[in-house]
Amino acid sequence: MIAQLIEAARRRADGGADALWRRGERTTVAFEWGRLKSAGASEEAGANLRVRHHGRVGVAGTTATAAPPDELVGRALASAALGEELDLVFPALGPLPPLTTCFDRAANASLDDLIGIGRSLLAGLEREGCRVNVAVERETTATRVANSGGGSGEYRSTACGISADVWRIAGDDVLVVSDALEGADVPSDEALAALVASINARLDHALRVVEPPEGALPVVFTPAGLSALMLPVTQAWSPRSTRGSITRCASSNHPKVPSPSSSPPPGCPR
Amino acid sequence: MIDRLTAALARSRADYTEIRVERTWSTAVSFRGRRLESATASEDQGGFVRALHAGGGWGVASFTSLDRLDAMVERAGELSRTVPVDPPIRLGAVPPHQADALLDLDGDVRGVPIAEKKRLLEACNGAMLGVSDRIVDTLAVYRDEVSEYWYVNSQGTVLHELRPDVTLSGTAVARRDGTIEKGLESIGMRRGWNSVQDKAPGFRAVAERAVELLDAPMVKGGTYPVILDPELAGVFIHEAFGHLSEADFVYENPQAREMMTLGRRFGKPVLNVGDNGAAPGLRGTLPFDDEGTATQDTTLIKDGILVGRLHSRETAAAMDERPTGNARAISFRHAPIVRMTNTYIAGGRGSFEDLIGDVKLGVYACGAFGGQTMLENFSFTAAYGRMIRDGRVAELVKDVVLAGNLFQTLDRIDHIAGDFRWNQMGGGCGKAGQFPLPVTEGAPHVRIEEALVGGDVGP
């Protein structure tokens, strides 16, 4: 598809074009409140096109990959009509940098492997009076890029995301401690053990409740606690964030598994 | 499409199967300052299958190529079989529905050129920039989408819907020397192009307030009677209480279930709270949720007592209650989970003046800049505030941060006015990686007899 896209764009855009095509598959397992609850698979393909026309740049994306390339080109040109004036050079084919993005262990991990990771985390986090949620996710993607200058490339990549949270509710007092791992490969046993130890250590600390002092006092922030300090800044960047992902109780019930490679390119629909 | 989906359903070997397919056209335009930052149009399509075998967990599969429909139905069934769940998942009973619901597009945004959308946003952005040379930056964003939606399940429900959504938002940043203030405007509707015309005055007003705040003093920190305006009261009830009323928080957690026991008193008899997915014309409104359950008005707190919660079919069955039409997904990439729709504090009696009449010294907190809910504890930043002195609204103050414990704060709501309104804003709700889900909040003016207000605490 990507060659057809570039060819269609080359015919209609006077300043060149580049395109990205990506196909991804994701497998997920979720343990809710201590028990395995669901397993999922997803397949997704999409393309993103950037064109330069009359000195202006426009972008368009689609997951309707069977649609005629001219449709996507038309939308990218409409975007370019209002787009930024930019000198954009589309480089010719050159050597690609040696970079490992795909790990066999992650690519070949079976559903049972992912369930096994989840069970090992559950075993390390279970304790009296607490409930545990765990999510494990593995993704493989194939990506192709090309441009009207003759440049092109393709690569495969893998990603794994693991998250866990432990809830302790006593009367009206709700405590939740969570952590997550993300990377291109399946995490090692040591990394999983460190995640368990991190949650357990923080839970132990949090269970020792003391009355906070009142008044104007020096405050020391942990790295994680710095988010509170940064809140006004992040809110300034993202107006109306109050109903966003900062809602702790909302985001922890079904843990979100970060998937570093799943973000589409700018303009590509989600 | 429906024939294709029902044929795929017929081939499923699972005990329960549902399929959703969506096709979405969307546009986004944004300005930063006087510069057009982006103008894009996208098209997104795909499907989602969820299958359940007796004794199995959920098997789910999503895809972007309809050619893969049959394979993904088969895959979802296989995944369900590989996840044994004990006790088994049950689904609350829902009558099968067949409906073709095309919501009022009120000017189909798909027929409006992107250049027109740019002109509309440029007028709103220009209204902010034109207020004063103290306005040093703006961000203005226009988004629209129309989704065509198909849903079928193996219990006979067949739905086809056309769902519009349009939002306009703006931030004005005012600066004088080292002092920076901002004003926010946000409009969101489940309608179309006609509904967002002539909105520039609202953008101008927030820019004017940002300039005004440059000279306003910080509120003095302390404990005050606090009156929330309808916008902040709506955000408060959504964030601080609404998420706790989502049944997936409690249905398999005995401790959470005890905390949210029906019949527990949460507030004074003036307090009535609900969630209404069937309220006409709001962003959280849809005729059916993403499990094919008809939406409804669900009372959560009646006369101060917890009487209800929000359910999917699964949570309803697990708690021997009835589905409420609150299983929602932000797109075909996600499973439906329990979500709010249009959440509200019901109107009470009297006017705003009645709320402040006997307040000697208090704070009137208006609008919402942001906030954080840490389970039963919350903190919200109001967009601005005004002191209340001797029963009258007095000087403008800034940096009004409300903090407290949900249960204590709900119990301290002692007066609710009769001036209810829905806050039709953009943005959305986030949960479990599904953001932004269109929702609306509504409330009248609400008085908290005593609340902690953060601010200037002096040397």
Image (cartoon, coloured by chain):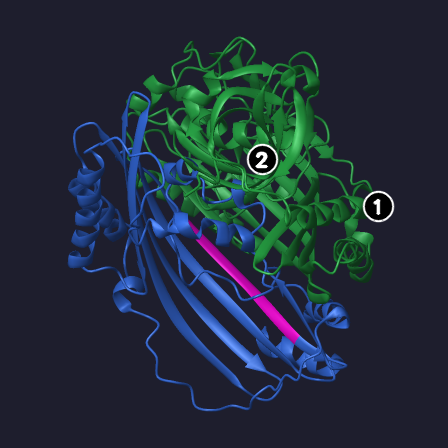
Chain colours: A blue, B green
Residue position for label 2: B152
How many residues crowd around disc 1 within 10 Å: few (fewer than 14), some, or many (20 or more)?
few
* In this picture, residue A77 sits left or right of residue A163: right
Q: Is residue B88 above or below residue B335?
A: above
Residue at point 51%, 44% (across, down): A244
Q: Which one is in front, B142 or B397?
A: B397
Q: Vertically, is A92 above or below B145?
A: below
- Residue B2's disc is none
3D distance between C-alphas at marks 1 and 2 = 40 Å
Q: Position of residue A189 (x, y in %)?
A: 16, 57
Residue at x 29% of width, y 22% of height: B255
The percent position of residue A217, horizontal first and vertical second, equals: 32, 43
Left-right relation of B377 to A36: right
Amino acid type at image mark 1: Asp
Q: Residue furthest front?
A: B459
Disc 1 with disc 2 on a shared chain: yes
Residue type, mark 2 in image:
Val
Q: Residue at x 75, y 54 (%)?
A: B128
Q: Residue at x 35, y 19 (%)?
A: B259
Q: In which chain is the residue bearing label 1?
A: B
Q: Quadrant of residue B314?
A: top left
**In front: label 1 or label 2:** 1
Magenta residue span:
A41-50
Circle 2 marks a residue in which chain? B
As helix, strand or loop, the secondary structure at mark 2 comes to strand
Q: Which mark is residue B198?
A: 1
In primary-sequence order, the first of circles 1 and 2 is 2
Is there any visible trace of residue B274 in the rendered image? no
The image quadrant where one finds the N terminus of chain A is bottom right
The image shows residue B46, relative to residue B431, as above or below, that is: below
Question: What secondary structure is the magenta-colored segment mainly?
Answer: strand
